[in-house]
Each structure stands twice: as structure tokens, then as C-alpha cells.
């Protein structure tokens, strides 16, 4: 049975059951990824940026004879932003290939259609059944990135310390746990606005103006995700010449997520990319004692960044694909197949 579900008012048992399904999915689809913990799971599912909406549904098994509620076997949510609905569907491995994924998708797609949105986008992990699932439904592949993972136990810290200081004169690095300080927010947002050559995919929009940046940092904190920033300041102008952002989610604090890394055009060729990333790893090593890995996503064409990441010890892990479809076409196709 598929029903709309609000994580803000859901029982703790439901949140725990959904987490169990997520971890069962990870164990079969991405066995090298760390399982998620319950900390701030409700907030992770509920909190959004101002102006965005997330709508969720669950599929729950029948209650047991003694009245115990059934497990959450499937989940779908859609984040409505701009003119696109970004979707995530999850089906417990024990309940797959029964049409549940398709039912969940149709429920969400109908709503996206009714709300007047044009298209649906989804991130799909390479080498998992989700590729065949979305392709069977007519989604097309828009963009492919490579996820790479750095195992911190293999890092040569002395070499890294050298990389962190290997930056041209006229720049200095700053480390800011929690986000950029208020006096640097404007300069920081300018650096992000100027450069779109970022590490993130299109479904994870960056924050290009100061207010959106503040909102996005607030939202991260509410969802239980701890942001860290290293930036390179150009001493002569006070400009933010480069920045790198890593987030440590309380739900999986052994593996951090690399967000944007940007070196502003005029400041390229001075060793900034290498130095800010190296400094970040050194800072994380002392700030996050549970951390053992960092994962990052790169466009396959971004050779300069791939080269620096390889030097730091990142190893390519999976393809990470963005698929999309026209909503009206999808609803029509799914309804016709019923
Ligand atoms: C993708 C997913 C939602 C599919 O759920 P499902 O309930 O098994 O899907 P359905 O039964 O509705 O399948 C619909 C169609 O998709 C295709 N399909 C689904 N799984 C497939 C597979 N393993 N191989 C080939 N085709 C597949 C088939 O065409 C299927 O129709 P059919 O069974 O009539 O042949 C499920 O595998 C899942 O939760 N994957 C994890 C997704 C995720 O977010 N992961 C993130 C962390 S890795």
C-alpha cells in the first residue's frame, strides 16, 4: 500500500524502518558504502531550503497479527525546485521486481504533473538495478560523473603537508568549520557565481548569492550535515581566489562528501586546487575523528581536477548518472501500461 508520508510527523518506528530499508539497499547495491545511522534521520528527510518542497510516500507491509505495524518496504520522495522534480525511489531488496518501484514512481510522477512541473530528474548509480529500471521507463541519460573515494589510511600525510603549503606567494589559506565567516560571505558567493566549473552535478545546485548561501548552510546544519570550508584569499584584492567544501553527515560520519571545489579563472595556475584540498584533508583528520574516507564526484571531462584528485589518492569507484524524462510522457506511459 502506497501512502503519502510526512517525515516530520512519522513515528520513530517508521523512521527506523525506512533506515533499515535504506541500509538493506546499500548492502546489496553499494556494499562498500558505510551503513547510515539514525542520528538526525528525521531532519535529513524533512528539512529543505526556503522555496523548495519535498513530498514523500511510503509503501508499508501489512500489519502483523499482533498489531505491530508492517515494515516500510519502499519509499519515494520528490524535491520540487525550479521547473524540475528531483526524485528518489527506494525498494527493499526483498520486495523488488514485483512492480512496487513502478507504483511508487507513478504516484510521485502524477503529483509532479499536477503541480505543473515539466520534467523529472534522478541520480542513478552505475552498476545497480536502478539503471535498467529507469531505462525501462523511458528516462534518458543526460550527464555522467565519476564518483571517486579516498581511503584516508593510505594517505601520506607528510607529502600532503607539503602540498598544502605549495601555493604561490600572495595567497593564504583559511580553514572555516561550519561555513565561511559572515565578513567573507559576499566574496565567497562571488567566487561561486563566477565559476560554474564545479565538481557538482546539475541536480545539486550551488549557491551563487549571499542569501542563498546562508540558507543553504542553515539547511545543511538542520539536516545534521557539518560543512567545512578551506579558502584561498588573494592578499592584494581580498578576493576569494579558490574554495573547497566538504560535508560530514552525522548519518555516515566515517565517509565525508566533497561538495564544490572552485578556483576562480584569474587565479588558476598557482597551485590553489592542490593546496586547498590537501589542507582540507589535514584539518578533517583532526576535526572528525571517526572519518576514514572522503568521496567526490567529477565530470569525466574535468581532467585538471581528476589529475589533482588522483595525486591525492582518490580512486574511481562508480559512474553516477543523471537521468531525466518529460513528466507528461512518463505519466502517460505508466498509465498506459497498467
Ligand atoms: C530501482 C528500484 C527502485 C526498482 O524497484 P523494483 O520494485 O524492483 O522495480 P519494478 O519491479 O517496479 O520494476 C519495473 C521494471 O524495471 C526494470 N527492472 C527493475 N529491476 C531490474 C533489474 N534488476 N534488472 C533488469 N530490469 C529491471 C524491469 O523492466 C521491470 O519490469 P519487469 O519486472 O516487469 O521486467 C530498486 O531496485 C531500488 O530501490 N534500487 C535502489 C535505488 C537507489 O536509490 N539506490 C541508492 C543507493 S544505491
Image (spheres, helix red, strand yellow):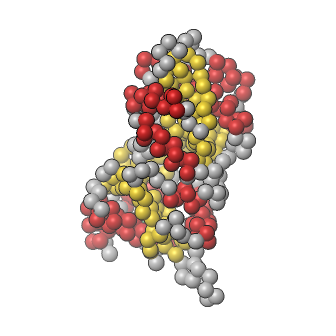
Q: Is residue 64 above or below residue 46?
A: below
Question: How far from the left and from the top, in percent, is residue 168?
Answer: 56, 13
Q: 241 or 282: nearer the eye? A: 241
Q: Nearer the viewer, residue 197 or 234?
A: 234
Q: Can residue 120 be seen in this view?
A: yes
Residue 79: which quarter of the image?
bottom left
Q: Which residue sits at x=62%, y=82%?
A: 68
Looking at the picture, tell me which residue is in the foreground, 145 or 173.
173
Q: How many labels does the image show?
A: 0
- 64 lies above or below 266: below
Position above or below: 111 against 269 = below
Name which residue lies at 70% across and 41% down. 288
Could you say where residue 47 lies in the image, as x and y percent from the top left? 50, 55
Q: Is residue 328 left or right of residue 27?
A: left
One can see residue 140 in this view = no
The residue at the far front in this view is: 183
Look at 61% across and 61% down and name the residue there.
23
Query: Residue 182, how many percent across, how many down?
Result: 52, 32
Q: Position of residue 83 (x, y in %)?
A: 30, 51
Q: Quadrant of the C terminus?
A: bottom left
> In the picture, residue 154 is in which quadrant?
top right
Return the residue found at the far bottom.
65
Q: Residue at x 52, y 75 (%)?
A: 60
Is 163 or 127 nearer to us in this picture?
Answer: 163
Amino acid at each position: 500500500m502506497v501512502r503519502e508520508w510526512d517525515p516530520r510527523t512519522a513515528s520513530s518506528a517508521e523512521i527506523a524502518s525506512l533506515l533499515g530499508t535504506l541500509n538493506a539497499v546499500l548492502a546489496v547495491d553499494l556494499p562498500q558504502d558505510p551503513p547510515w545511522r539514525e542520528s538526525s534521520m528525521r531532519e535529513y528527510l524533512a528539512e529543505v531550503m526556503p522555496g523548495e518542497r519535498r513530498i514523500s510516500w511510503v509503501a508499508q507491509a501489512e500489519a502483523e497479527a499482533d498489531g505491530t505495524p508492517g515494515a516500510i518496504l519502499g519509499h519515494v520522495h520528490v524535491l520540487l525546485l525550479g521547473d524540475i522534480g528531483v526524485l528518489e525511489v527506494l525498494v527493499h531488496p526483498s520486495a523488488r521486481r514485483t512492480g512496487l518501484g513502478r507504483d511508487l514512481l507513478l504516484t510521485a510522477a502524477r503529483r509532479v504533473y499536477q503541480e505543473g512541473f515539466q520534467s523529472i530528474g534522478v541520480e542513478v548509480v552505475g552498476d545497480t538495478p536502478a539503471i535498467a529500471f529507469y531505462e525501462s521507463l523511458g528516462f534518458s541519460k543526460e550527464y555522467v560523473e565519476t564518483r571517486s573515494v579516498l581511503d584516508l589510511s593510505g594517505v601520506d600525510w607528510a607529502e600532503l603537508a607539503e602540498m598544502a603549503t605549495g601555493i604561490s606567494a600572495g595567497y593564504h589559506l583559511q580553514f572555516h568549520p561550519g561555513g565561511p565567516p559572515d565578513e567573507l560571505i559576499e566574496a565567497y558567493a562571488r567566487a561561486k557565481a563566477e565559476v560554474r566549473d564545479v565538481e557538482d552535478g546539475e541536480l545539486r545546485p550551488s549557491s551563487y548569492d549571499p542569501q542563498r548561501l546562508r540558507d543553504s548552510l542553515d539547511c545543511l546544519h538542520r539536516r545534521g550535515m557539518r560543512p567545512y570550508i578551506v579558502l584561498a584569499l588573494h592578499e592584494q584584492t581580498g578576493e576569494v581566489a579558490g574554495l573547497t567544501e566538504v560535508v560530514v553527515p552525522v548519518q555516515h560520519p566515517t565517509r565525508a562528501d566533497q561538495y564544490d571545489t572552485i578556483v576562480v579563472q584569474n587565479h588558476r595556475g598557482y597551485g590553489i586546487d592542490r593546496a586547498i584540498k590537501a589542507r582540507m584533508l589535514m584539518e578533517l583528520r583532526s576535526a572528525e575523528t571517526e572519518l576514514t574516507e572522503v568521496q567526490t564526484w567529477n565530470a569525466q571531462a574535468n581532467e585538471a581536477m581528476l589529475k589533482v584528485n588522483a595525486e591525492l589518492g582518490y580512486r574511481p569507484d562508480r559512474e553516477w548518472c543523471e537521468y531525466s524524462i518529460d513528466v507528461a510522457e512518463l505519466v502517460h506511459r505508466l498509465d498506459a501500461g497498467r
